[in-house]
Amino acid sequence: MEDALLAELDQRLAAADAALTSLYPGDRGVRQPVHTVYVPADRFDAATVGEWAAQARAALDEHGKSEDDLAKALDLPADHAVEVYERVRAKLEREPIEDLRIDFEDGYGNRPDEQEDEAALGAARALAELVKAGTAPPYHGLRIKSLEAPSRRRGVRTLNLFVGELAGAGALTDGFVITLAKVTSVEQIEAMVIVLEAVERTYGVSSGSLKFEIQVETPQAILGPDGTTPLPGMIRAGAGRVTGLHYGTYDYSASLGVAAAYQSMEHPVADHAKDVMQLAAAGTGVFVCDGSTNVLPVGDREKVHAAWRLHKRLVLRSLVRGIYQGWDMHPAQLPSRYVATYLFYREGLDTAAARLRAYVEGGDSGYLDEPATAAALAGFVLRGLECGAVDTKELDRLIGVDTAGLAKLARRPLRS
């Protein structure tokens, strides 16, 4: 009886099983950057990454020059500042930008075609120079204008010129990604796939290798005219090319009528949108990225410290909500980005490690952790390792596993 029953169930559920495997493949096995830095295309050249690094270090030197100074600046307990200070300094030396996006959208604006053509080619050449020198951020790319009718031709042309220049220089890497702005329909995602297929054919790029992020900054991306969210359909329409959903704080808030003074990453309309994004992306391997704060750490010491404290609080808030990436728009935001991120992982490390060791060794941590929780704990530590908040020596000492073992616990194939 059981064999016959199970055979019938296998047959009945075959389509559902296949859909589950196809639509929810799980973790892609790649590192998620902690931020995306947006630089207007007309302000980007081969020196930009180095200049951002230098300006970030200068901001830390001036406004957080010691562990005690940083503790006062960011309202940190002294032991917390000691825990992260040198790690943040080392990060700003080693890898100040994890993900770079050269912006041809709002940060660049509308220019004459010949001017944007020149900017696209110049920015691509500069990025190719960084890639060949080995100094490009591990993740990098461009943001193009929307596929809405008024900007469609300009966005496609910029993408075509940029990718063609990179491909011709042999500088297209696995870390290259495109951000598509102001998406309003599933049909635009289908169109983007057609565009990428054409670009790949034109320049001899491997089929399916060009990936893109969907910028969620319009009400239509969260709620369709039928009362459902189109985001799952957008991810499916991307045919395996969609890598992220990026929240656009200010366009989205303004579209809903939120007054400028109250537009924020923590406004209720922002939280609702990001809740929907997280639900749509869950299990798909698509990353969710928070937006930015427009309060920049510039001016006198008091203003810089106030902006750092706000940024630190907002970054920690996103991390607690399970959103591990956000936008940074100014070099002086890098210190507060990494301080907040490192605090998050350092503060949770000992507890997560103890629970993982008990899970692996069959000991008692005071928690009854199931496999899914163990995977979440391992994923937490692995993210901390990838961004520099945790080092490999701590894995062996605290958990008794290496990086590969940690990735296995996190149910994640470790590829990069």
Image (cartoon, grey):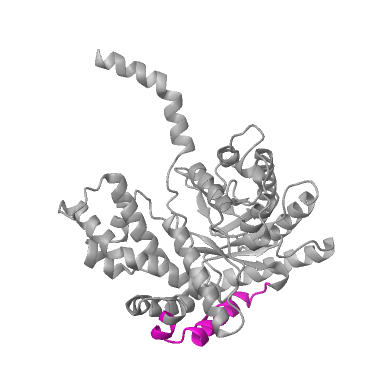
Residue visible at 15% across and 54% down in the picture: 364
- Position of residue 218 measured from the top left corner of the image (x, y, whole percent): 66, 48
- Position of residue 59 measured from the top left corner of the image (x, y, whole percent): 54, 82
Position of residue 246 relative to residue 191, above or below, is below
Residue visible at 64% across and 37% down in the picture: 224
Residue visible at 30% across and 48% down in the picture: 373
Quadrant containing the C terminus in the rendered view? bottom left
- Position of residue 90 measured from the top left corner of the image (x, y, whole percent): 43, 78
Q: Quadrant of residue 42?
A: bottom right
Q: Quadrant of residue 186?
A: top right
Determine if residue 270 is in view: yes
Determine if residue 401 is in view: no
Q: Main secondary structure of the magenta part?
A: helix
Between 147 and 297, the residue placed more toward the observer is 297
Between 133 and 378, the residue placed more toward the observer is 378
> Which residues lie in the magenta part?
44-71
Between 349 and 296, the residue placed more toward the observer is 296
Q: Is residue 285 left or right of residue 350?
A: right
Position of residue 198 relative to residue 127, above or below, is above
User: As drawn, which residue projects farthest toward the left?
Assistant: 363
Is 63 part of what is drawn in magenta? yes
Q: Is residue 136 left or right of residue 391?
A: right
Is 168 part of what is drawn in magenta? no
Quadrant containing the N terminus in the rendered view? top left
- Position of residue 23 measured from the top left corner of the image (x, y, whole percent): 49, 37
Q: Is residue 381 left or right of residue 243?
A: left
